[in-house]
Image (cartoon, grey):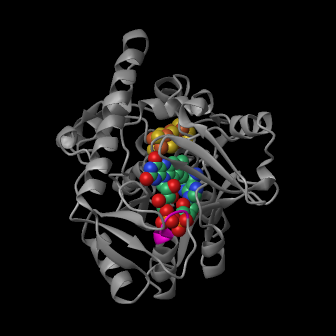
Amino acid sequence: MPEEKIAMVGTPCQAIAATKINKYSDKTGGSPITVKIGLFCTENFSYAYLKEFLAENNIDMNEVKEFRIDKGQFKAKLIYGDEFSTPIIKTRPFTRKNCNICTDFTANNSDISVGSVGSEEGWSTVIVRNETGKKIIDDCIENGYLKSKPLSEKGLKLLTRLSNKKIKDNSKIVEERESVGRQVLSQRVIDDEEFEKEADLCQFNNLEADVISVGGCVLCGACEYVCPEDIVEINDRKPQKYGKCREDCHACYYACPRTYLSDTVVPLDMDEKPLGNYIDIMSVTAEAIEGQDGGAVTSILVYLLENKLVDEVFLVGQDEDQAWKPKSFVTGRIQDVVAASGTKYSTVPVGFKALKNRKLNK
Ligand SMILES: Cc1cc2nc3c(=O)[nH]c(=O)nc-3n(C[C@H](O)[C@H](O)[C@H](O)COP(=O)(O)OP(=O)(O)OC[C@H]3O[C@@H](n4cnc5c(N)ncnc54)[C@H](O)[C@@H]3O)c2cc1C
Ligand code: SF4
Ligand code: SF4
Ligand code: SF4
């Protein structure tokens, strides 16, 4: 049977998890992810608190047509045409605390990174990171899936400034956390040999001590996905182990984006390169798609599926029963991909769950 291919979309932390799962596939079992589309990300919110905050402002999640963060304002456009807008500072109480120790703004670990910063309304900023990404973007442009133009100098400056700001602000918080508590391992970049030496000594109890119990977990679900014994389960709050670890298994520690990152996952010179390594950067829009910004992500996924470059895509839609509650799923249907466009501004509980279920159902 030919090897399966899946494209994923996710926040920078989810892209790191996917990178580690495949990079250390001999320890984790790997994944079918062959294309990673990463989203720019300043911070993420807790769904429950976001819902509560809106309710305090007399807004029901069911009435929201679109969320948007723009020029320092958190906005909810309502289906009746009104707009709720509040300074982003007011959302601080329900920002996920583990986002404060994250310094990756532009999803360095992806093939293609996409966001709004730097481009005008209706356009997306695209960072092409490698040859895989370049081939996809070139083909999308050539075949009418995307229209492109150069990113303006002003746009590039703004993007660089915001990326630098996230690195600077959150590095300070990391320092503060470390001065009163444990090390923030994902900020300790070591080499692969050192990482493997360390990870080969670690199992779920170490993941619990080093990441989960110190408020570092991003709820990505990678630990649950890779566990060969199927003993890790994540409710909305945190991963837990129900059973005995397989002797000599360290898969969850290898896969987690919040344990050490090796210098082949995050290059050591990132401080001098706030946008990470890339080979091209531009503004794009997909005229046929109504997306969060330029509809770039949806259009790229449609291109990959229509041209059979991947079998399925792994992305984030909304829960059927709770408006705007993000839910990950895997699909090969274009209509599902189009329906999942738009940003859900809260953490996807157990992002890799859908991929796990797919693996179990095979
Ligand atoms: C939590 C979060 C914070 C962000 N912060 C910034 C920011 O500070 N600056 C910036 O420029 N851009 C930010 N973005 C990215 C931006 O909101 C758009 O997603 C991006 O510009 C792509 O737009 P598009 O029109 O190409 O995407 P679309 O074609 O609309 O597709 C959007 C894709 O995003 C995926 N998605 C939606 N919600 C989530 C989620 N919660 N987690 C993972 N994937 C999801 C869906 O699978 C969908 O395929 C953020 C995105 C998220 C999810
Ligand atoms: S940890 Fe938070 S800020 Fe960092 S990429 Fe993940 S969701 Fe975004
Ligand atoms: S068996 Fe234990 S160490 Fe291995 S992935 Fe599962 S929880 Fe982690
Ligand atoms: S502990 Fe599990 S869910 Fe949490 S960040 Fe690590 S891999 Fe993701």
Total labels: the figure holds 0
Q: Is residue 338 left or right of residue 145?
A: right
Q: Mark yes or no: residue 19 visible.
A: yes
Q: Looking at the image, which residue is at 29% across and 39% down?
A: 164
Q: Nearer the viewer, residue 53 or 312?
A: 53
296 drawn magenta: yes
Q: Is residue 186 left or right of residue 310?
A: left
Q: Nearer the viewer, residue 236 or 224?
A: 236
Q: Residue 168, position in %: x, y? A: 31, 30
User: From the viewer's perspective, is residue 308 above or below residue 211?
Assistant: below
Q: Looking at the image, which residue is at 54% across and 31% down?
A: 89
Where the C terminus falls, by quadrant? Answer: bottom right
Q: Mark yes or no: residue 250 visible.
A: no
97 drawn magenta: no
User: From the viewer's perspective, is residue 346 above or below residue 151?
Assistant: above
Q: Residue furthest front?
A: 82
Q: Looking at the image, which residue is at 38% across and 90% down?
A: 143
User: From the viewer's perspective, is residue 127 above or below residue 49?
Assistant: below
Q: Is residue 46 left or right of residue 180?
A: right
Q: Residue 357, position in %: x, y? A: 65, 60
Magenta stretch: helix, strand or loop mostly: loop
Q: Is residue 245 left or right of residue 164?
A: right
Report the magenta residues as a range.
Answer: 292-297
Q: Residue 7, position in %: x, y? A: 47, 69
Q: Residue 65, position in %: x, y? A: 71, 59
